[in-house]
Each structure stands twice: as C-alpha cells, then as structure tokens.
C-alpha cells in the first residue's frame, strides 16, 4: 500500500484526497485494504480517480473528479 502518488496531485483534487483519507482511516485496521489515488486521461480529459477496497467489509468506493 503506497500513498506516495498523492504528493504529485494537483491542488484542485485536494477534496478527493480528503475523502480518500477519511475512508482509509475508517478501514485502517482491516485486513485486505487496498486503494490508491491517480490521475488518468480519458478522451482528452484529465480525471482524478480515487478508489478504495476493503475485502474484510466488502466495501468498494470509487470517486472521480474532472481536474
Ligand atoms: Zn474494512
């Protein structure tokens, strides 16, 4: 689980990062926690994508934001 990618994100998706951090904190103690934040270009549009998955709680969270 690496969170180093978050340091390269643009300030406009700081809210996305905060949401991710909140979910991450909620499942910090769980087994099978995975997630990341990344920037992807789709059809010429740059998106910030955050996702988190916790197999212990059967939770899958994903959020996208146009940057
Ligand atoms: Zn969990």
Image: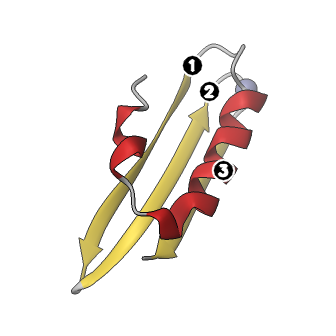
What is the C-alpha distance between the residues marked 1 and 3? Answer: 21 Å
Q: Is mark 3 within 8 Å of ligand 1?
A: no
Q: Which mark is residue 18?
A: 3
Residue 31, quarter of the rendered image:
top right
Say which quadrant the N terminus sits in.
top left
Residue 22, position as x, y percentages in the image: 73, 41
Specify whether 35 is left or right of 5. Answer: right
Label 2 element class: loop
Residue 42, quarter of the rendered image:
bottom left
Residue 10, position as x, y percentages in the image: 40, 63
Say which quadrant the C terminus sits in.
bottom left
| Residue under the point 72% across and 26% down | 27
Of callouts 1 and 3, the N-terminal one: 3
Q: Is mark 1 within 8 Å of ligand 1?
A: yes
Specify whether 14 is left or right of 57. Answer: left
Of callouts 3 and 2, the N-terminal one: 3
Specify whether 37 is left or right of 17. Answer: left
Residue 50, position as x, y percentages in the image: 50, 53
Residue denoted by label 2: 55
| Residue under the point 57% across and 59% down | 14
Whether the residues at callouts 1 and 3 have beta carbons within 8 Å, the answer is no
Q: Is residue 56 above or below residue 61?
A: above
Whether the residues at callouts 1 and 2 have beta carbons within 8 Å, the answer is yes
Task: Give the tally of numbered discs.
Answer: 3
What is the C-alpha distance between the residues marked 1 and 2? Answer: 5 Å
Residue denoted by label 1: 32
Of callouts 1 and 2, the N-terminal one: 1
């Amino acid at each position: 689980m690496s969170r180093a990618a978050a340091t390269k994100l643009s300030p406009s998706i700081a809210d996305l990062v905060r949401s991710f951090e909140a979910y991450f904190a909620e499942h910090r103690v769980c087994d099978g926690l995975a997630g990341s934040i990344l920037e992807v270009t789709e059809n010429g549009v740059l998106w910030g994508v955050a996702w988190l998955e916790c197999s212990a709680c059967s939770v899958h969270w994903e959020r996208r934001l146009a940057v």
